[in-house]
Amino acid sequence: MQPSTNQQTEENQLHFLDYWRIIRLRKGIIFLNFIVVVLAATFLTYMLPKQYKSVVRMEVGKDAGDVPELGQAASPNTYDPYFILTQFERLLSAEVLYPVIDELGLVKVWSNRAGGAPLTRQQTKMLLTKSIKPNQVRNTSIIELEVYSRDKKEAAEIANKIADIYKSNRDRQRREMVRSGIEKLQEKLDDQISVVTNVAAEVAMVRKETGIDVVMESPGQVALTLDTERLRALEFQNIEFRAQYVQKRTQLDELKKLEQVPLQNAILTVKPSEINLSRLLEQHTTAEQEMVGKSKDLGPSHPDIVRMQGVITRIEGQIQERVAGIMRGLESELLALKASNDERLLKLEEAKDQNRMAAEKGQRYLDAKKKLERQERIRDTIEMKIQQEKVNGVIPRETAVQITDPAESAIRASWPKPALNIAAGVIFGLAIGIGMAFFIEYLDTSVKTIDDVERALDAPVLAVIPQNVGVLMDEGLDSPHAEPYRVLRTNILFTTKEPDIRTITVVSGGAGEGKSTTVINLATIFAQNGNSVLLVDSDLRRPSLHKRLGFENSPGLTDVLLGQKKLDEVTQATDESRLEFLASGKLPSSAMGILNSQQMRDFIKDVRQRYDYVLFDSPPLMGVSDATVLASEVDVALLVVQYRKYPQSLAVRARQMVDKVGGRLLGVVLNNINVSNDASYYYYSGGHYQSENTSEEFTPMPIGKIQRHPEGGESAKAADVDLKSKY
């Protein structure tokens, strides 16, 4: 089943609280880093020399004239970000900064200010470059040049001088470029004039060599004596004559095919102007009509008929002769027309040859003439460009660089800024302090939480003891520090399954983890609940219980084990009526290892029969074998682990040593918890109980997975308390 939103929110809240607990726990480190960083920032702020800033603003554009250049239309000065970035580099270039250094004498001034070896121009330029910061006003062509200096007046002078030199350099460079360009163009013009002269001479030579007769010249055209139009006229005439010849020859051929009478009529059709033939034909017709008319009255032999017959014969002969003459005339005309046509064809071919030769000569001349015209245009263009550049060169360029706001002396120092630096110191101090706190927390491998203990040792935490806990017999029954020990006593009873467990030893992995205080107070709690208790100081190396309880250390346990004293002779009564104390006694050098003896085992059997509970204090497990021997001889052992003191590996090693000797580790007591810094342990330390009756009616707070004693009545389930695994 998916966790609910409320559960997730609670987990997130606990997560943030964990970070807050680390901050509270390491507040000393955080405060120390905070104070050091803030003091350092404040000290540096007021110790560093003051820097003053002056700003000059100038509008920078491309080299366009105040009026449009000759031959160009006016165009707006469009925004170009790359051009602005280029001007940044030019402002910081040597061609601008070195004149500023020389004119203001910065080498000498800054050398005296440094008080050391004299500066070179290059070193001064490097220092000046670091004190200059060009900026661009967003979406404009305006450049802000910031200059920093210890002298407010000097900062303004440097800023204004850089702007002036930059502006003059732009104008000077433009004029030099124009002058250099005009010189190059003039050289090119001189060369081009020579080229034009040479080409003109070449044109004259071509004209002379070809002998061409130029009638008229126009761009790209040359008119010759025999031009194309005249040639076309000759061709047209030749076509006409050819048509006439074909026509006449066709007529003559057709006439030759006709008989005499049709021929006579056809000739009149062809040559209607032939009057003689027409008259003869009329006479012939008249004679025939007359003869036909007289033949009706006269016979064929009549002299008139004969005479008229002779006349008709004579006229017919004349007609034939005339027709033959006309035919011969037509043939002569045809021959003459053919001869004339042939002559015209010959002349046309000759004219074509002449025109072709003239065209070839004219094309050569025309090519040379075009070359001359092209070179002349190039010469004229260069000459015009020179004149244009000369005119454009005198056009002012005041709009290229305009100083809109000259630099002024600063009113106050721009750096260092106390408020900003101290605020930054506060922020960085807190950040460094918190970071150091979390870093130290990351490096800290000591026991921090209950889960750390239970996960590493595989043992339940029976109690959580707060800091500054003293001896309960001195603090009284109403001491709030008694609550966690009541929790410990109750959890011991819940944890143990055997009812005859009476002997308990309290051990620790290292020295100073609070086992002596724990065993004293636990014995006090057992006694306050009506049990007879014997507290044994079995730390024979460095006994300390007698000092805490105000007794002498001798006689004690060693006297009993060596048979020098009886138990009743060495036990001492405490302020708690049911609690007796047995000091360690003095340990002779010959009695080393006395705890690992039959006398010690007999002693434990004896006290188990006399007292309800016997609690043994022991030396640290690491480095001393007495503690492990004692843990193997008593019923159960309690391991005291001090909060955030030793690495977890020490506690793990202590647990392993108890297991190796066959001892039984009942659980762990987490000691010396700073409840004020880690409120999560407040509920586990017993500090929230306000019950006035501290005996039968007290109900402990379960710490880990605790099982109730089988004789406790109702079967108790294992109490699982969800504890946070880390901060």
Image (cartoon, rainbow, N blue to C red):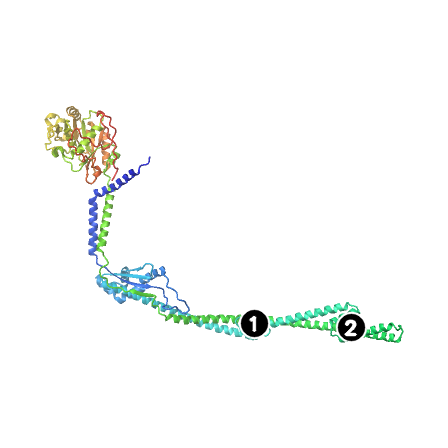
The answer to whether 359 is drawn above or below residue 116 in the figure is below
Dividing the picture into quadrants, the one containing residue 73 is bottom left
Numbered marks: total: 2
The answer to whether 264 is drawn above or below residue 143 in the figure is below
Residue 302 on image: x %, y %: 89, 74
Q: Element under label 1?
A: helix
Q: Name the residue under label 1.
A: 362
Considering the image in quadrants, where does the N terminus appear? top left
Q: Nearer the viewer, residue 367 or 625?
A: 367
Q: Residues within 10 Å of mark 1 (few under 14, many from 20)?
A: many
538 sits left or right of 202 in the view? left
Q: How far apart are marks 2 and 1 (CA)?
A: 56 Å
Question: Residue 323 got which mark?
Answer: 2
Three-letter amino acid code at the position of disc 2: Val
Q: Can residue 245 be seen in this snapshot?
A: yes
Dividing the picture into quadrants, the one containing residue 698 is top left
Q: Which of 490 and 46 is in front in this view?
A: 490
Mark closer to the observer (2, 1) = 2
Considering the image in quadrants, where does the C terminus appear? top left
Residue 655 on image: x %, y %: 23, 32
The answer to whether 370 is drawn above or below residue 717 in the figure is below
Q: How crowded is mark 2: few (under 14 residues within 10 Å), some or many (20 or more)?
A: some
Q: Nearer the viewer, residue 583 or 363?
A: 363
Question: Residue 501 got which mark?
Answer: none
Q: Element under label 2?
A: helix
Residue 448 on image: x %, y %: 23, 38
Three-letter amino acid code at the position of disc 1: Gly
Q: Earlier in the sequence, mark 2 or mark 1?
A: 2
